[in-house]
Image: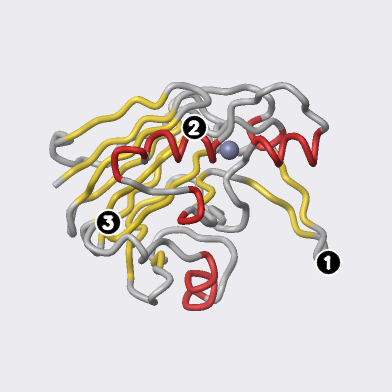
Amino acid sequence: MKKNPLPLPVQQYHIAPQSGTAFTIKKGQIIRVIDVEGGQVSDLFCFAEKERKECLSSGQTTDYNGKLFLSKGDILYSNRSNPMFTIIADQVGGHIMLYPPCSQKMFEKSYGVTEAHPNCLENLLTSLKGFAIEESQISIPLNLFMSIDISEQGKITIQPARSKAGDYIELRAEMDMIVAVTSCSAGTCNNFKWTPIDVEIYS
Ligand SMILES: [Zn+2]
């Protein structure tokens, strides 16, 4: 899709398939997360820079927006009910904040994987090492580009991501934050094809 006219990014990150990155962002800056080749899920989790006990909250975000599927105009809230991000542009829609980051334990439990498997939890933790963030501080991230179907009985089925090459979402930071982003390593949601995610930051 055609990109919005924004000034040149002040920072860019290329996230290789099945990896992640972390960075700081200031209030008012905009982060654009781009699905480079299409069909790729990305987890985003964040902490208040000043107080790392304050982090993204699926519960508060679902409650205050009154919906499961997030898109332009919706606000992502912290566990202290403060706005962290506002979605200001979105070419895909239907983003969710429902699933924990995929993990070695998830691959073992759900798919019987016995060998080491790349996963978002490990990639978030590795990326956040420099910020002294531990596993217990990570909860449910924003599952960007992830696609699910919910039946009338409430059964959830994970679908391959419907985003196309170059599709993006833009989020405006509502506080100074530490942000971690992955290119997800799970199977079904990425249609078993793992591709990069680009992140651009604008002032
Ligand atoms: Zn993942």
Q: Position of residue 65 (x, y in %)?
A: 48, 74
Q: In terms of image quarters, where does ligand 1 lie?
A: top right
Name the mark on residue 183. 2
Q: CA distance from mark 3 to mark 1?
A: 34 Å
Residues tagged 3 and 1 counted as in contact (Cβ below 8 A): no
Nearest to the eye among marks 3 and 1: give it: 3
Residue pointed to by mark 1 = 152
Residue 94, percent across and down?
56, 54
In the shown orientation, is residue 33 left or right of residue 12?
Answer: right
Q: Amino acid at mark 2?
A: Ser
Q: Nearer the viewer, residue 141 or 40?
A: 141
N-terminal-most mark, 1 or 2: 1
- Residue type at tag 3: Arg
Q: Earlier in the sequence, mark 3 or mark 1?
A: 1
**Secondary structure found at label 3:** strand
Disc 1/disc 2 C-alpha distance (Å): 31 Å
Alpha-carbon span between mark 2 and mark 3? 20 Å
